[in-house]
Image (spheres, coloured by chain):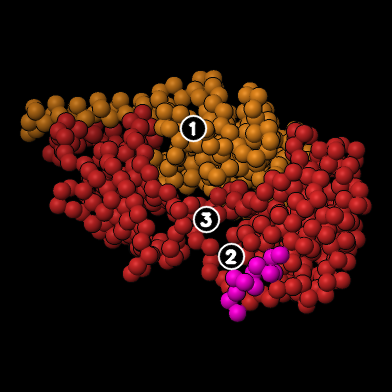
Chain colours: A red, B orange
Amino acid sequence: MRYMIICCLLMLCIVGGQSTLAAAPDKSLNEPSPTVMTKVISHVSKDAVTGVEKIRVVFETSGPVKINSSISASPSPRLTVNVKGAGRGSVPDTLDFDGNIINKVSVIEREDGSSTLLVDIPTLLGDGDYRVFTLRNDPSANRPYRIVIDINKPVPPVVYNFTPGLKDKVIAVDAGHGGSDPGAIGLSGVYEKSITLAVAGKVKKLLEKAGSQVIMTRETDCDIAGRNASDVAELGGRTAIANNNKADVFLSIHTNSFTDRTVGGSAVYFTQKSMYDLLLAQSLDSALMQNSKFKDRGVSRGNLYLTKYSLMPAALIEMAFISNPSEEKLLQSPAVQQQIAQNIVNGLECFFAEAAKRGGG
Amino acid sequence: MMQMGQRIGSLLVLIILSALLITACGLDTGKNSTPGASSKPAEQTVDPAKTPGSGIEGKQVVVYFPTRDAMYLMPENRKILPGQDPMRSSIEILLSGPENQDVVAIAPQGTVLRSISVKENIAYVDFNHAIIKNNPGGSTTELLLVGAIVNTLTEFPDISGVRILVEGKQVQTLTGHVDVSGVLGRSEEIIKKRK
């Protein structure tokens, strides 16, 4: 906006006879010239909902182009984007990145006025991890034609040496909310913090019976970091307990809530710190569906504090919706709580069995 | 001495630029907009024709609301009155709820937008304490609320990220699940795909 005014003022000066450069932009507006890349912009952002880090590289072009892209593994992982109809123009032939998601982009101009973008990446990408597309221009918004490359940050290649079975495993179990924070509240007045504590206690008993060492973030109706502590101290207190005890797995147990009281079901959230987080979430989700009173909402990546800042594979279980009156009632039933606890323990057992197969040891 | 042809050429450029300037006025999202923001890095994947502020009128904004089943967000196009600040209006529409029956209101009761400002393509959106105090809780509600705020604001071409404030202060979480401590980027994954 402001730079447009500056441009106009500049042009006024030129009209006043100070420069002979004035004809240049005029000419480019009237005479068609071959399409070229005019600018490259990159931007890293974190998805607010999934927490996935993504880089977007945008090549602006002076006209429309056609693109196609492919991934190759050797000699080193690379995304190749063929750009039909645009030369390299004023864009540099090599663009260096920090290596987090992209190492380097090389721009090669072909003799026919087309170009190729060679995007060197640290690890090979799956089909869902990148997207290449074009956007048409929007003169009313002063936006040019664009080639957009979106790449998700790859899952770090962490390897754990998990053995099968629950014996001697260290499991951190977090009963969601507590103390001054009741969590979600059901229509009949039931507190999330009470349900989560009851189920966490049952999980603890079952795990101990199976030979695991259980670290509870709380065993009573209390705040972890003190009544007047900040929310982040409260959450940080929970991950610190898991991290300091070097737990193998961290589980946070919750009940869900939504404005529409007909919405229900179980859900498991995770943050993709390693491939084990997804495996843990999937193992828990499928186990939770055994003899379940609740429908399956599946596993989702979530930008959640507890699963993000715990150092080990972690999952946040939303057992059911306390905002749904029939689920609220079921969640209070000791038999239903026992079934959920048993399912969680079975899910952990499946996780360790599968994780051991994926190995590293 | 300047030649006549050159002078006419220059005048032509001036006229074109003035036209662009007038067009660009339709994009202005208020006094807090960042200067030179057209070089904004994060592009929108939406149809440019539906981008808020497109064209001289700039009377339409896109606001995100959760689907009834609480699985996704869906955009709703809403008209705003001439002279209203599009960014502020879009958040106020988000707070007051949708018109479309396929989606539901997500903002906790009594939530008020205290202020909104833009610095270096980041929107700083400040709510009153009701967004925490009256929040019904649950990971799903918190994720959808945060996603709706971020996706509504990143509809504006000038906005690449969002920082959520409560009572003027930076917060780490709203109800103890979602990490809102940093700059939050747009989520394409949570948007319901059209069939």
Q: Is A104 left or right of A222, judged from the image as shown?
A: left
Q: Which amino acid does label 3 sit on?
A: Glu
Q: Disc 2 on helix, strand or loop?
A: loop
Q: Seen from this angle, which residue lies furthest bottom?
A: A361
Q: Look at mark 3 in the image and give the residue it sits on.
A: A53
| Front position among marks 1 and 2 | 2
Residue for point 52% across, 55% down: A53
Across and down, in percent, residue A249 comes to 71, 68
Query: Can you tell which quarter of the image residue A344 is in?
Result: bottom right
Q: Look at mark 1 in the image and give the residue it sits on.
A: B29
- Residue A328 among those drawn in magenta: no
Q: How far is disc 3 from disc 1 in space, using C-alphas?
A: 28 Å
Q: How far is disc 3 from disc 2 in space, using C-alphas?
A: 14 Å
Q: Look at mark 2 in the image and give the residue it sits on.
A: A274
The crowding category of the residue bearing disc 2, from other C-alpha atoms within 10 Å (few below 14, some 14 to 19, many at least 20), is some
Secondary structure mostly seen in magenta is helix
Chain of the residue where label 2 is placed in the rendered structure: A
Camera-nearest residue between A298 and A315: A298
Residue for point 25% across, 25% down: B15
Query: Can you tell which quarter of the image residue A60 is in?
Result: top left
Q: How far is disc 1 from disc 2 in space, using C-alphas?
A: 41 Å
Give the magenta-colored segment's residue range: A350-361
Across and down, in percent, residue A250 comes to 73, 65
A68 to A32, vertically: above or below: below
Q: Which quarter shows the N terminus of chain B?
A: top left
Camera-nearest residue between A44 and A250: A250
Residue for point 67% across, 58% down: A281
Q: Earlier in the sequence, mark 3 or mark 2?
A: 3
Residue for point 60% across, 74% down: A359
Q: Which amino acid does label 1 sit on?
A: Thr
